[in-house]
Amino acid sequence: MKKLVLLSGLPRSGSTLLCNLLNQNKEFYATPTSGMLEIMANIKKTFSHSDSFKGRDRMEIYKDFSNGLEGFLKGFYNGKNVVFDKNRLWPSQLTFLDQVMKSSDTKVIWTYRNPIEVLNSIEKQHYKTILLENNDEKQVPNEFFTQQRRLEHMTNDNSFVTTPVFALDDAVKMGYGDRIFMLDYSKFVANPQKVMDLVHDFIGEERFTYDIDNVKQNTFEFDGVYNYKFLHTIKEGKIEPHTSQNVVQQNMFEYINTRFGWLNEYATEKCKHY
């Protein structure tokens, strides 16, 4: 592995499309949603809490453990050149990753989309598969029987929509803002080649001409595990903007904009140059 780039961001904000486009470049390898961070966290947990390791002075083998994590990560992607690993929690783990990689060169591509559009996309899929419950609905059904309750649940502090925002906020506060490229979904689908040129410049790779008129699905995830509520498929063919019917009630707009006010302001500032 020559280089690692981290992919993160909001759900329904173009990360799957981005990965399928990146994989047109033979020098690149973009993953679907990756468990690499989870694996490394579990190895760390074993090192921290296993009775076998506790029987030793772990500070004496601390460097060995760091080398082992680095070796696992690089070995897992052996033979790949530039790897784009997708996990929405990566921005909050940059300090951890820097120690493993022995550098502070790893950068993040963070996909942003107006949160109202994100929640609208999720809500539309809810209606398409309304005969199936999502995983959270099984646990707390009372939080899903009205749209307002669904949206409030989707935007609580522990939701899959909000957690990536907290991870981004942490990275910015930790001083890693210059290592994060905010990819605005609306600008991406309006002018994909221009945005991809900026991505290449940001990660320090030679520009590449992408076939934006003929994008094919090349990363695959089994969405049945989510009861087909959160799809990871793309519309094959030409990348272009499309108008989506709004199903989110107008009375929720102010709530959503307030909830994600910091993110919207930050993204506007970070994306104003393109």
Image (cartoon, rainbow, N blue to C red):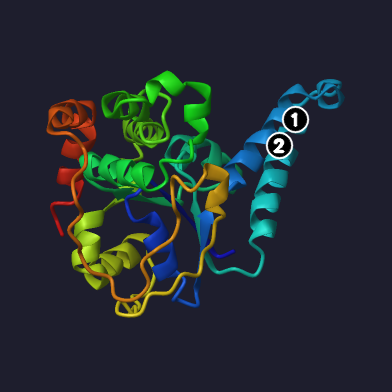
Q: Is residue 144 left or right of residue 55?
A: left
Q: Which residue is mark 1?
A: 46
In terms of depth relative to the viewer, which is nearer, 232 or 175? 232
SS at mark 1?
A: helix
Mark count: 2
In terms of depth relative to the viewer, which is nearer, 148 or 77? 148
Q: Is residue 27 above or below residue 101?
A: below
Residue appearing at x 26%, y 25% in the figure: 148
In terms of depth relative to the viewer, which is nearer, 57 or 39? 39
SS at mark 2?
A: helix
Number of other residues with Cα within 10 Å of mark 1, as a class: few under 14, some 14 to 19, many 20 or more: some
Q: Position of residue 268 (x, y in %)?
A: 15, 45
Q: Which mark is residue 7?
A: none
* Image quarter of the N terminus: bottom right
Residue type, label 1: Thr
Q: Quadrant of residue 237?
A: bottom left
Q: Which residue is mark 2?
A: 43
Q: Is residue 271 above or below residue 249?
A: below
Residue appearing at x 42%, y 46% in the figure: 129
In contact (CB < 8 Å): disc 1 and disc 2: yes
Q: Is residue 52 left or right of residue 226?
A: right
Number of other residues with Cα within 10 Å of mark 2, as a class: few under 14, some 14 to 19, many 20 or more: some
Tell me the CA gap for discs 1 and 2: 5 Å
Q: Is residue 109 above or below residue 19?
A: above
Q: Position of residue 262 (x, y in %)?
A: 21, 31
Residue 10 in view (yes/no): no
Q: Position of residue 119 (x, y in %)?
A: 28, 40
* Image quarter of the C terminus: bottom left
